[in-house]
Amino acid sequence: MVSWSVRTYEEMTYRVHGTVDCFAGENELLATVAQLRPGARRLVVVDREVDGLYGRRLRDYFAGRHADIEILTLSAGEKNKELSTVYEVVDAADRFGLNRRSDPILAIGGGVVTDVVGLAASLYRRGTPFIRIPTTLIGLIDAGVGVKTGVNYDGRKNRLGTYYPSIDTILDCSFLRSLPARHISNGLAEAIKIAIVRDRTLFELLEKHAVELIDTRFAVPVADEVIAHAVGNMLGELEPNLLEQDLHRLVDFGHTFSPGIEMVSGGALLHGEAVAVDMTLSTALALQRGMVDRAEAERITGLLRRSRLPTRHPACTLDEAWRALEETRRHRDGALHCPLPSGLGRAEFVENITRDEVASALALVGGALAWDEQ
Ligand SMILES: NC(=O)c1ccc[n+]([C@@H]2O[C@H](COP(=O)([O-])OP(=O)(O)OC[C@H]3O[C@@H](n4cnc5c(N)ncnc54)[C@H](O)[C@@H]3O)[C@@H](O)[C@H]2O)c1
């Protein structure tokens, strides 16, 4: 028999736009990216909470453009991030009679809704365009700007997923005004992550302004600068390695132990909170190795505390931390590639972490250096 080898590549292009109050009648951005000509048909999938808060303005916006929309509302939260929710989107697309090339699906909500709709869009007829409007801070600076979609499966985070960019993402901080403070802190964890591994200026901005950013729900002038740093660095890190061909990823800082710990906590820890617990443990590992000094480690945990994030949690036992690390090693194809801070705004990859090292780092977090008690 003859053999063939086929080679091709697919270019990925997508845009991320910032705006203010995207449902204001005079704001043209959404109408432009969603091509809302009179008579245009759009399936709009909205987080149920967001629909309650912004649904009237959303409907008025589309009505003002004489667009015909069908709205599907989804419940957010980790327990709804599952395949059955993907099927809800697929069923709605079928009912709606979606035109696969020219009718982008709109996904409006937090990371759960944008991840679920992204997965549905990537699967529906092998790929249907979609547009994201993230409404949480995690969505604005992380889930809404990359290309990963996914749902949890069998108690494992994001076990099923695809790499599939939305054609456009609209970033609008006005949605944060209604977001509970805990979810602002939750999103700040991802900003702190990117600051620690690549952007000392952002770290210092957050040290100075974290409290007012939480208290005002990002309604302060510095908010734009923080978002610009966080998103710019995130995209700078993702763009050369969008499909994760290289498993050395600085954005994985805080994501070595956290996926396991988040699931084991049974919903007690939000994603960013689990990342904060992981970042503290990882910082303790870095301190033990002399990669950061005590003052730097305390600035990191001080910023987490100021951002009202946990630095430890009962779910993060030695057994669970070790199980999570082993699972992460498998996820990274057998090599750990664990990013640890090597200063503020810098990180290096570490390959060999022993169970004893994790045990003493945990002791450091909870004992002699109980940073969160000071
Ligand atoms: N795809 C990626 O690259 C990526 C990156 C980071 C995180 N994530 C995923 O994102 C998820 C976490 O995202 P999340 O924190 O946005 O969770 P979420 O989508 O569950 O939203 C959090 C809560 O906020 C509510 N909400 C959303 N917008 C609101 C608003 N403007 N005002 C008031 N309430 C609002 C939601 O109804 C929900 O109760 C996790 O599943 C995580 O795995 C994905």
Image: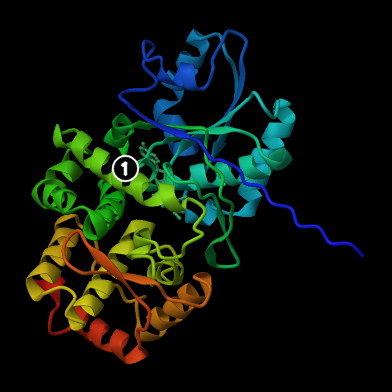
What residue is rendered at 32% in x and 76% in y? 314
Residue 28 percent across, percent down from the top left: 41, 14
The quadrant where residue 57 appears = top left
The quadrant where residue 228 appears = top left
Q: Residue furthest front?
A: 2
Towards the viewer: 334 or 46: 334
What residue is rendered at 50% in x and 42% in y? 114
Q: Which residue is mark 1?
A: 231
What residue is rendered at 37% in x and 22% in y? 22
Q: Where is the C terminus found, in terms of image quarters?
A: bottom left
Q: Is residue 108 above or below residue 161?
A: above
The quadrant where residue 357 appears = bottom left
Towards the viewer: 130 or 63: 130
Q: Is residue 325 above or below residue 174?
A: below
Residue 368 percent across, percent down from the top left: 12, 84
Label 1: few (<14), some or many (≥20) within 10 Å? many
Residue 367 percent across, percent down from the top left: 17, 84
Dot 1 falls on a residue whose secondary structure is helix
Towards the viewer: 221 or 294: 294
Q: Amino acid at mark 1?
A: Val
Residue 260 can be seen, yes or no: yes
What residue is rendered at 39% in x and 30% in y? 53
Residue 270 can be seen, yes or no: no
Give left or right: position of 81 versus 123: left
Q: Where is the N terminus found, in terms of image quarters?
A: bottom right
Give left or right: position of 313 versus 54: left
Give left or right: position of 110 versus 21: right
Q: Is residue 88 above or below residue 251?
A: above
Residue 182 percent across, percent down from the top left: 28, 51
Q: Residue furthest bottom?
A: 356
Q: Is residue 287 above or below residue 71?
A: below
Give left or right: position of 334 versus 240: right
